[in-house]
Image (cartoon, rainbow, N blue to C red):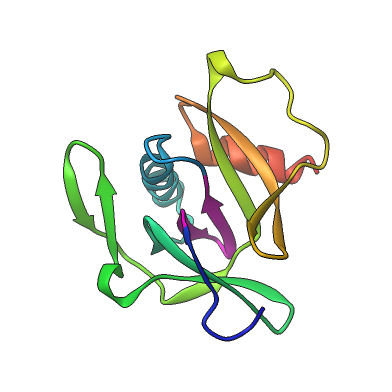
Amino acid sequence: MTGIGENIHATAIIVDGIGLLFVGPSGTGKSALAFDCIAEARISGKSAALISDDRVIISRQNGHIIGHGPASIRGLLELRHSGIVRMEWVEQAPLHYAIMPVVSAEADRLPPEHEQFEVARDIQLPAIRVPRPVRFPLSHIFALIRSV
């Protein structure tokens, strides 16, 4: 896939060069989890920015999976029940992992090994499940990335 790309329902951020795509149905906490990860990154001195909230355009460019947002919502993130906030953002960035928020009580204790998430037609990313709520979501995600 090249060119414009496929517009999907997701939220994407980049932290220290690692692109995280938060996926799942509406109301599962994608935006809140992304916001928490950006806040945790900044507290710990890591660089972090929003790529796009709610809609992410996915494409392949030079062998990389790239995410960017529609112009109308650039730099905006919805904090459900609180409002829409402006965030530091980047126009586009490579995506490396699909982050799947899960309700702890409803999920299996261990996910399938080498789980992949199909983010767009013929595009998959390694999946990381993150229980909601979790105290330090970015630390949780990075611990799982390092253990692979």
**Which quadrant of the structure image shows residue 123?**
bottom right
Residues in magenta, as a range? 9-23
Residue 12, placed above or below residue 141: below
Verify whether residue 67 appears in magenta: no
**Residue 13, image x and y in percent?**
47, 58
Residue 48, placed above or below residue 133: below
- Asked whether, in this view, residue 62 is left or right of residue 69, the answer is right
The quarter of the picture where the C terminus appears is top right
Furthest residue to the front?
121
The quarter of the picture where the N terminus appears is bottom right
Q: What secondary structure prevails in the magenta region?
A: strand
Total numbered labels placed on residues in the image: 0
The reply to whether residue 133 is in sight is yes
- Asked whether, in this view, residue 18 is left or right of residue 74, the answer is right
For the residue pair 116 and 36, the one nearer the viewer reads as 116
Residue 112, placed above or below residue 30: above
The reply to whether residue 50 is in sight is no
